[in-house]
Image (spheres, rainbow, N blue to C red):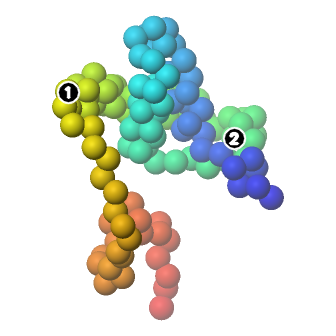
Amino acid sequence: MQISVDVHNYMETLVGQELAKPEYTDNFDNEQLADLACLALSQLRPVYIRYDIDFLSALPEERLVTLKEYAVTAIEAAKTMIVDDRRKNRKDDVPVVFSRQAFDDDVELEWFERPILQKTK
């Protein structure tokens, strides 16, 4: 099994469908569209599936409409970050390089880093 081939996030499909509309393709370049996709997907809960047809046949239409609305809302929120991109006004474009990574194992995980299911003792 190859996880990138056999399993995918259906929200990527919905975000991709929305970003393929002329409203986005006519106004943003490929770099900006990729940034929009990343920013939007970061806001959305993933829906991992194997086969679109199986997923869609079992999904109530109301739920699909809701997922599409979530994708549109996330893209709209991301669009404000792209339109008001502070990076385009920078005078010094110096990359930041860290010589070594330092992780503190005692720091509590962020909410998005915690497993959804907690171990029972």
Q: Is residue 65 left or right of residue 50?
A: left
Residue 114 location in percent, x, y?
A: 42, 69
Q: CA distance from mark 2 to mark 1?
A: 44 Å
Which residue is outermost to the right?
A: 1
Which residue is outermost to the bottom?
A: 121
The residue wearing badge 1 is 89
Residue at x 48% of width, y 91% of height:
121
Which amino acid, mark 1? Answer: Asn
Q: Is residue 66 visible?
A: no
**Crowd rating for badge 1 (residues with CA inside 10 Å; few <14, some 14–19, many 20+):** few
**Crowd rating for badge 2 (residues with CA inside 10 Å; few <14, some 14–19, many 20+):** some
- Dot 1: element: helix
- Of residues 44 and 62, the one nearer the viewer is 44
Q: Which mark is residue 15?
A: none
- When asked about the image quadrant of residue 60, the answer is top right
- Of residues 88 and 117, the one nearer the viewer is 88
Q: Is residue 46 left or right of residue 109?
A: right
- Dot 2: element: helix
Q: Is residue 115 visible?
A: yes
Residue at x 36% of width, y 82% of height:
105
Q: Is residue 88 above or below residue 50?
A: above
Which amino acid, mark 2? Answer: Phe
- When asked about the image quadrant of residue 106, the answer is bottom left
Between label 2 and label 1, give the one nearer the viewer.
Answer: 1
Q: Earlier in the sequence, mark 2 or mark 1?
A: 2
The residue wearing badge 2 is 55
Residue 115 location in percent, x, y?
A: 47, 69
Residue 57 location in percent, x, y?
A: 72, 35
| Marker count (numbered) | 2
Q: Is residue 11 above or below residue 68?
A: below
Residue at x 32% of width, y 79% of height:
104
